Amino acid sequence: MILLRPVIIMIFLGVFFWNTPVAMAASETTQLPVPHIWEIPDGVWVKPWNGACEEASIIMVDKFYQGNPRAILNKAISKKLMNRLFPIEDRLFGSNADTNATRTQKLINDYSNFDAVIKRHPTLEEIQSELEAGRPVISLHYGYDLNNPRHRFRRGGSSYHMMVLTGFDNVKKSFYVNDPELSDGIDFPYNYDTIMASLRDFNHATHEADGEPTVLFTEPKMFVRAENAKRVYLVREGVKYLVASPKALQNHGWSLKNIITISREELARYETGPAFDN
């Protein structure tokens, strides 16, 4: 009986640890080559540029998924790309300032080359997992809690800010962040505690950044065509949507740079949704 005790103990421990979830440790360092845009290309804090962190963040991730190399995008390109989004927001929302997670998600999903999912109360590990998988994370903040003396939030304003998390360093306990508020804000370091504690969605009812801790998880859009065919489809959640005209591509800001060719049989397996014709 005494000889069996060690065996029984080992079996018990084996069952215990087999059924106990073990958190997977993140890599020491991950850094994605996301291009950077300064939200005020002319260096002057006037409308609409003084509230363009959302547009700049969208463009940074959009360019990453199109394969643009890590760089600071120049003034002319920055203005052109952000100027495309301002009138779309004005038409959809009546304003291009202080775009909350829901509005930003719609803008991304309908008018960029990637899709976004709203994630409330994200954990550090969940954010790290997205970055390790090669997907930048758009983060929403109460700006004053970022404690960055270089930020220029308007007195009496919402202090709402949006940035792009591009990587992390587990040794330094910090994120790499593309901060559009800073002209040199590419891979700017913010410690974990600062980022996680300052996460806040914008609240259109109070006009303050006092909503739930929120980020946007991202992934590239999937455009496909069948072998030896010209028709192009956007595939989303198992449904294919015909992109019916070049005008539709232009109006939505979509690029076919990373289009995938699949078999006709594979294309037929997707359900068919309404076409994009404008």
Image (tube, rainbow, N blue to C red):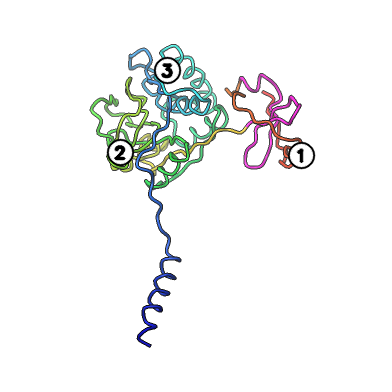
Q: Residue 33, can we see it?
A: yes
Q: Position of residue 61 (x, y in %)?
A: 47, 29
Label 2 Cα crowd, 10 Å radius (few <14 / some 14-19 / many 20+): some
Secondary structure of residue under mark 2: strand
Mark 3–mark 1 Cα distance, whole angstroms, equals 41 Å
The one nearer the camera, 62 or 43, is: 62
Q: Residue at x 55, y 28 (%)?
A: 113
**Residue beneath disc 2:** 174
Q: CA distance from mark 3 to mark 2?
A: 24 Å
Q: Secondary structure at mark 3?
A: loop
| Amino acid at pointer 1 | Glu
Q: Considering the image in quadrants, where does the C terminus appear?
A: top right
Quadrant (top left, top right, bottom left, bottom right) of the N terminus:
bottom left
Q: Is residue 140 above or below residue 15?
A: above
**Alpha-carbon distance for marks 1 and 2?**
47 Å
Q: Determine whether 43 is above or below 221 in the image.
A: above
The x, y position of residue 187, in whole percent, is: 35, 29
Q: Nearer the viewer, residue 143 or 60?
A: 60
Q: Residue at x 37, y 82 (%)?
A: 5
Eye-nearest disc, 3 or 1: 1
The reply to whether residue 165 is in sight is no
Give the magenta-colored segment's residue range.
223-250
Report the residue at 47% width, 36% height from top: 135
Q: Is residue 187 left or right of residue 222?
A: left
Q: Residue 265 shows which numbered tag?
A: 1
Q: Which numbered disc, 3 or 1, marks the residue that appears first in the sequence?
A: 3
